[in-house]
Structure formats: C-alpha cells, structure tokens
Amino acid sequence: MKKFSTKTFTFNTFCSSTDRGVTITANWITHNYRSWCCIGCVFKNRVFFPDVERAEWINKIIKQFWPNINYYVRDILKDSAEIALRKNLQGYGLRGFTFERIVLGNVPFRTGGIIVYENVSRDEIVMDIDVTYAGDCDIKFRISRLKGGIKNFQLFGNLRVVLKPLIPTLPLVGGVQIFFLNAPEIDFELDGIVGVLEFPGLSDCLRKCVKDTLASMIVLPNKFPIVLTKEISSEKLKTPNPVGVLRIHIIEAKNLLKKDLTITGKGKSDPYAVLAVGEQTFKTEAIKNNVNPKWDSWAEFVVLDYNGQELQMTIWDEDQTVDEFLGRASVEISALKLAGQSDMWLTLEEVKHGKVHIRSTWLTLSNNYEDLKSAIYETQQLQVPNMNSALLIAFIDSATNLKQVKASTKPDTYVQLQLDKQVNSTNIIKRSINPVWEEGIILFINNPEEDCLNIKIVDAKTETDLYEFFYDISNLSQCDGLEFIKEPVRLDYGNAEVKLIWSLHLKIFKNENFEEYLQKRTLSTSSTSSQPAIERKGSISSIASKQSTNISDIAETAFDSRSSTRSKSPESFIYGRSLQYVGEINMTLRYSLQRQRLIATIQGLSNMHHDNDKKARDLYVKMYLLPERNKASKRKTQVVKNTFNPTFDQQVEFLVPQEELNSKKLEVSVIEEKMLKNVMIARTIIDLQEVSLPFSGSFDLHFKKY
C-alpha cells in the first residue's frame, strides 16, 4: 500500500508522535503550516502555534454523531458520487459502476489544527480545519460484471468551513459552505476479485476517478453548500463568486533528473508539467529527451478564495508504463495576487535538483463593459490561442412542466451548457418534470461580443435532448451590472408554463498592470529620433521625453480593428558593413514582454553578390540563438527557388526570458540548397545587447567565420 509522505501527517499525528519521543523538524512544520504558522515549542503533550487550536472536543462530538454521519454520507455517495464515478469510469471503457455496500465503519474522521479568521466579512465566519480519515470503512462495488471493494481508505486535507450569511434570527446562520482549498491526498487498497486479479492500470484508473469525483464535489471552485433556513435564497449560497483569475505562463525548467538511461549510459527524461489550482488542472506537452525543457505553455485558473489556496506544479517524466516523478513546487496564490505580475524560478521539492520558471498575472473581475476593450487587446498582444477575456457565471435554478419521452416514466434530467469546447452539466434530477437543480457553473469566454452559449435540457435515461436554445452573450452588455437574476426562458412556444429559471453574470478580466505595460510598449515601439538606436540603455527614456500616449485610444483602435498594432522604426540602416560584404538581409526584430519572445521577421535578401556566377540559386535562411546553438533554438525559412535576391516575408520566434535577452546573440545564415549537401554562402551574428528593439532595417552578410 502506498504510504503518505512525511509532510502529510496531521496535527494529531505529530502531537501523538511527540509523546513517543519522535522528533519533528522545524522545516517540516513550517512547510505544512505555511507562513502564518510560526513555530512555537514542542512540549510533551502539545505543539503551540499562534491562532491554531487543537479542539479535541470537536472530535468527541463527531464520535457521537458518527453513526448518523454514516447514513448521510452513504446517501450522498449513492445519489451523487455513484453517478459521477460511473461517468468518469466510462471514459476508460469501464461501464456499469454501482455501489453495493457503503459502511464507513466505527472509526470517525478526526480534526487537527483549527484556525478561525478574523479579517473577514461581517456577515460570515470562516475557519480552516485539518481533517484526517483513516478508518475501517467497508465499501463494495460492481464494475463491468466484476465485484470489488475499497479498504484502508485514507484521506488528509485542509477543509474550509464558511458560515454565511449571519442572520438576526435562529439558527443565526443562513447556511454552510464546505470545501477543500486544495485537492486532499487520498489513498486506498482494492479488495475483492478486482484487487486479487490486479488488472493492469485498473488501480490507477480507479484512484484517479475517485480523486476526480471528490474534487468535482467538494474541492474549489466546487463547494458543498447546506441551506439552514428558508429566509436565505439558495442562489446566494450556491452561486460561485470568483475573486479573480490567475494566468500562468510556464516557460521552462532546468537541470531536471535524468530518469531514462540510454544505451550509451547517458540519462534523459521526457518531462511534462501538471499545474493545479484546487480541482482545476492543466497539463503541458511532453518534451522528448530533454532535462532543460521549454514548454512555453499558458493556463488560466478561476480563483474563488486566494487565502490558503496554492498553485501546485508537479513535473513528471513521461514513460510508456508508469510516469516517474521529477519534483514538485507550490506558490501561495495570495502572494501572486499581491505581486500582480510575477516572474520567478522555483526550486523543485522532494528531488535532488531541478528548477521551474513561471510568470503569473493576477486578473481582477470587472462589471464594467468598457473594460472589455483592454481585455481583448491584451489577448491579442499575447498571440496565444485559447486565452480568454471574461468569465460567465450561470446559476441553473429549476424548470417546470417538462415533457416526457415515455408516457409511463418521468425523465431524469440535467442541464448542459456548452461554450466552444467547454461542456459543463448539472447533476441529474431523477423522475421529475419540475426539476430543481440550484447549481452554479463557471465558463471561460474568449470574446463576449462573438461567443454564443448553447443550453440543452437532456433526459439522462435516453440521452434525448428535450429542449435546446442559444443565448448571445453580448446581450448581457445591456443588463445592469452585466447580469440578470432568475429570469424565466420559455422552452415551448406552444405552452407558456414550460420554462427554465436561470441567472447569468458576466465578469470582465482586468489587468491592473496592463496600462503600465501598454505605456512601456508604446514608448518602446515609437521613435522620434533620427539617430540610429544602437544602444539599448536609455532608448526608452529618450523617447518618453518626446511623446505622450493615450492608452484608451490604443485599446480602442485595437478593439475595433481586431488586430495587434505594429510600430515601425523611422528609418532602416546598414549595420556594421564588413570588408567581406556579400549582401544584406532585411528583417525586423522585436520583443514581446508578455509572451517572453524574441520575434524576427525575415523580409528577404538584397544586393547579393555571387562573384562571377550569374546562375540563380535556391536559397533559405537558417537562424540559431546563441550561445546555446542547439536544435531547440534552430529556425529556418522556406526555400525560395531560382533567385538572386529572394523574398521570404516569414516570421520566427524564440522563447527568451527578459532577463536573459541581453546575453543572447542571433546567428543568421544564408544557405544554398543543393542536391548532395547544402552550402552556407553568407552569415552574420547579431548581438542583441547592441540593438535597440524594436528594430527594422538591414544587416550586412559576409563570409567571416566566428
């Protein structure tokens, strides 16, 4: 059975361990209780942390409640988790999953450290509880005609409990929200015929599906709400209320472990990264045979509560059998929010060496439709597919008088929302023509002015679409606060009583630092000086003194044109003509700060000297980024045949962190394509430290070797 790493022991575990004389290191404690848990002293019976309490009385209450909790959890697992597990397992070709027995046993879960927050809203109480379960549960299931079971189930995580809103009448609290801030650690053993036969991959498949199902129910952004009084609207408690979006650019990693041994004895790895914020995950592509991979991947995560949540990164080596662990790193989202924009190297934990390079941007959410112009302009500047400019929050309340596919049975219905490739569904309400879902769903929007939401009400028994309609998201721009609350939608124009009750909220991304970025970019891409800008230092400030910029005008222009602006240098110039001059290459160079990329556009060659050979040639341009000069930094244009001065008009890009730009050089070679062996006929090396970007002009080509 897989054992938890030492860092996953609970507060109770190490408290009891100190009684047995086990030493607890300061590094371990600070890692688990984060920056707000300053270390006190370890005495015989307890460990002291400021604001963190060990409420043993709660465990005594839970022990009394445990038989009733057992029945309640069994109903939840049977009604909700079974359906979700069945759906998840179908993706692996495993059908017909059903629970046959659910008994949580006699050993209840235990609470460890408890912290109650003070700096919160006046109408709520927020507390974090370390929860551990290592009981004697007896769970039996059937899958694909095979019987199995789960035993030795273990769970550890940090559970947040929110009591809101506080009301002046009994029970004084309108409702409760329960959720894990980050995905809890889960482990278990398979029992029965499934466990005995040990089908290849089945254990891992079941483990992943159990984790995914739990995350979909109770890991942020998903919450488990309980309404305690009818005086409080269920929508207020169950509608997701995100506080922002975290945009992550995972750039590269360095010095990773070499997990795969080659025939020559040298090591290699095929690394990929998995990023997670609560339930939301993102996986990069695997880079083959490289311990210094450059992923250059982007991801966006919805954040409902930045206090206590972490951005977690795990690096894996992709293998044909089982992927191997290359390290993990984590950052508190509260720190990333405070910084606004961050660029950092993180040292990987639980391995000997390795680092990962990320950039983060914190995006607030706005109800002002005018902010959409800047949000769309920002995504245009990124030039990255699948970047978004807004969130759509839907609350599906209920429907009335739905039709029946079969007259003898009422439908089992759910609502499906689709926006581009995103498909989200509510839970299934069984045997009802008046279903009440009361569920919130969050969707990313690329462009609210163009995107359209597809809504279906589906009968789960027959997978028949009972009703379908479309909603143009741009209609929300006409609503106060970019939202409407519990509006009915007629589903059948022949019957006014057939309707869906729902709410929609549009939230526009707003980058507080983007105006500053636009200012810098505009100044850097403008030039009013007639002198060639050879030196990088001071070029921005010299332009800034001569030009002012209206940011809103820039965003307005970009929004209307739907394309990125392009700035040109006032003149082209010849750079460093040498004695062995054979021609010129015409190109532009610029640097994208947000994308961390050097972008080169090769227009063509001019004034090419071919000695006395007047035969036209088949030419192309090849480029390397120095000092690496490896396959990863190699770029080349297409071949232009039968020409003296070819025109390419082709753009290439290099992933270069901003702090490394001055240390890079660009090797540019002109190659003649021949039948047996290609021949280099000219070359130049461009020192990026000596060129002020953006640059548009010509560079001399020569034969000189470096």
Image (spheres, rainbow, N blue to C red):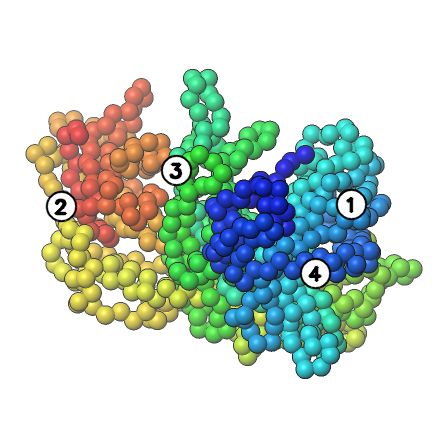
Residue 621, by quadrant, is: top left
Q: Nearer the viewer, residue 401 or 516?
A: 516
Mark 2 in CB contact with mark 4 (< 8 angstroms): no
| Mark 1 vs mark 2: in front | 1
Q: Which amino acid does label 3 sit on?
A: Lys
Residue 104 appears at what percent x and percent y? 79, 49
Residue 694 appears at what percent x and percent y? 24, 53
The span from disc 2 to disc 3 (Cα, nearest Å) is 38 Å
Write down the residue under mark 4: 57
Secondary structure beneath dot 2 equals strand
Q: What residue type is labelled 2?
A: Ile
Q: Residue 137 carries which label?
A: 1
Secondary structure beneath dot 1 equals loop
Side (left or right) of 65 relative to 286? right
Q: Quadrant of the N terminus?
A: top right
Residue 585 seen in the figure = no
The span from disc 1 to disc 3 (Cα, nearest Å) is 44 Å
